[in-house]
Image (spheres, grey):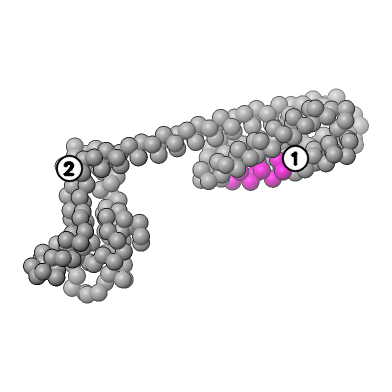
Amino acid sequence: MKQHYETLGLNQSATQEQIQFAYEKLSKELNPINNDNQEFFIEEYEKVKQAYNALNQSSILKNSESTSKTTRPNRPESSSSSNSSDSFTVTISKQKIEELKNRKLDIEEKQTYVSAGLKTLSILSMIGSGFWLIIFFVLIARYTNIEVIFIFLIFLFPFILKFIGALRMFKGKKSGYKIYMIPSIILNIIFILSILTGHQNHNLIVAIIFTFSMIIFSFIFHSYKGKLN
C-alpha cells in the first residue's frame, strides 16, 4: 500500500478525508482533458485513480459504511480539523511535471538501451553457437569412427541448446536464460578441466579463448536476467 500513498503525496497515517481531498486535487490537475490529452497525463491520471481505488477499498480505511467513494466530504471548519487538512500539501507544479516527464524519458531510454544490448548479445551468441554447430556437423560428416562421432554429438547438443536459449532471450523470454546457461556452465567446466589436465595442450590458446568468451557471455547474460519476461 505504501506506493499508493506516495502516488497521492501522502504518508501512511493519512485519514480517509485526506485521501479523498488528495485524490480530487490531483485528479483535477492531471486530468488529460485539461492537458490536451497528452500521454504523460493519461498515464499519471490512471496511476492516481488506481491508487485511490486501492486505498479506498482497503479494510484499514473502511471505518464507516457511510463513507462515500465518490463524494468529497465537507471541508472541516473547526481548528482541529483544519490543522489536519493543513498538515499536508497536495499540488503538482509545472516544474514537478517536467521532472516526472524527464524521469520517464530517462527510464524509457535505459530500457531501450538494455533491450538493444540484450538483442545484440543474443545475436552474437547465436552466431558463435551456429559457427560451432557447422564445425561439428562437418567433422561428423568427415569421420567414420563411431566413437569419435559420438563424442562430437555430445558436444553438438549443448551448442544447439545455447543457440535456442540465445534465440529465446533475443525475444525477451526468461526461459531462454536457463536453456542457455545450463549447457554453457557444463561446457565451461569440461573445457576448464581439459585445460588443467593437459588435454588441450595442442590447442591450448584456442581452448582458453573459447572458455573465456563463454564465461564472459554467461556473465553478461546474467546481468540482463532481470529484464527478461
Is residue 176 one of those drawn in magenta? Answer: yes
Given residues 165 and 98, the one toward you in this image is: 98
Structural crowding at the residue carrying mark 1, measured as other residues with C-alpha within 10 Å and reported as few (<14), some (14–19) or many (≥20) = some
Lower position in the chain sequence, tag 1 or tag 2: 2
Q: Residue at x 63, y 40 (%)?
A: 219
Q: Residue at x 80, y 39 (%)?
A: 192
**Residue flagged by tag 2: what amino acid is it?**
Ile
Is 138 left or right of 82, judged from the image as shown? right
User: Which quadrant, please, contains the N terminus?
Assistant: bottom left
List x then y, in percent, for residue 55.
Answer: 29, 63
Dot label at residue 143: none
List x then y, in percent, for residue 6.
Answer: 31, 55
Q: Residue at x 89, y 36 (%)?
A: 198
> Would residue 27 be visible to someone looking at this image?
no
Residue extending furthest toward the left:
77
Given residues 22 and 229, the one toward you in this image is: 22
Is 182 left or right of 4, judged from the image as shown? right
Is 98 left or right of 226, judged from the image as shown? left
> Would residue 155 be visible to someone looking at this image?
yes
Pointer 1: what residue?
A: 188
Query: Which of the 4 image quarters holds residue 147?
Result: top right
Q: Is residue 67 above or below residue 178?
A: below
Residue extending furthest toward the bottom:
64
Is residue 56 one of those drawn in magenta? Answer: no
**Residue flagged by tag 1: what amino acid is it?**
Asn
Of labels 1 and 2, the one closer to you: 1
Kindly state the secondary structure of the residue where label 1 is placed.
helix
List x then y, in percent, for residue 117.
Answer: 53, 32
**Overall secondary structure of the magenta section:** helix
Report the magenta residues as a range. Answer: 175-185
Pointer 2: what residue?
A: 33
Kindly state the secondary structure of the residue where label 2 is placed.
helix
